[in-house]
Amino acid sequence: MLKLGALKAGERMFDLGSGDGRIVIMAAQKFRAISTGVEFDTDLWKQSTDRIKSLGLEARAKIIHGDIVKQDYSSAELVTVYLLPSSNDKVRPILEKQLKKGARIVAHDFEMGGWTPEKVENIDDDGEGRSHTLYLYRR
């Protein structure tokens, strides 16, 4: 997702529904981006926040414990989403309103309804026998 979104060092990225924080951590570690996750589940938020601290990434990575529809994404150069279609539908108008021109959005497995992807990438086998589809959009 980060590679398809062409994340660069120093850019700001958000992962909506960040789960265990793996995308946020990878963005900070490997891409040297300023990364923020948004996670509603308390256990996942705590787990990912603890992992960021244990890796010493607090300067470049954080997880917001909150609702994805109540955040400010206006500083984002890249937004990653791995949400169900109903959640994509809820967050799409917020991204349309807040994201600056040129910001990239990468959706995993489920398209952002009403948007036309700039690029679609199919992953036949993720190493665990599962296939995935990634959708790149640009505002």
Image (cartoon, rainbow, N blue to C red):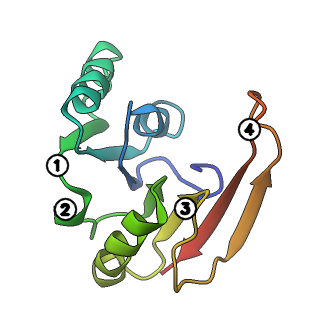
Give the alpha-carbon distance from disc 2 to disc 1, as whole Å: 8 Å
Marks 2/4 in contact by CB < 8 Å: the verdict is no
Residue 4 drawn above or below residue 136: above
Sort mark 3 into few (<14), some (14-19) or many (20+) by Cα contacts within 10 Å. Answer: many
Q: Which of 70 and 86 is in front in this view?
A: 86
Residue identifier under label 4: 130
Q: What element carries label 4?
A: loop
Q: Name the residue under label 2.
A: 71
**Amino acid at the residue labelled 1:** Gly
**Residue at position x 61%, y 57% in the image:** 109
In the image, is 82 to the left or to the right of 95?
right
Q: Is mark 2 on a helix, strand or loop?
A: loop
Given the image, on which type of amino acid does mark 3 rest? Val
Can you identify the residue that label 1 sits on? Answer: 66
Q: Residue 106 carries which label?
A: 3
Question: Which residue lies at the image location 24% right of the left edge and 32% below the top edge?
Answer: 45
Residue 116 on image: x %, y %: 62, 83
Secondary element under disc 3, as helix, strand or loop, is: strand
Dots 2, 1 in contact, CB < 8 A: yes
> Spatial distance from mark 3 to mark 1, Cα to Cα?
21 Å
Q: In this view, does 29 lie above or below 102?
A: above
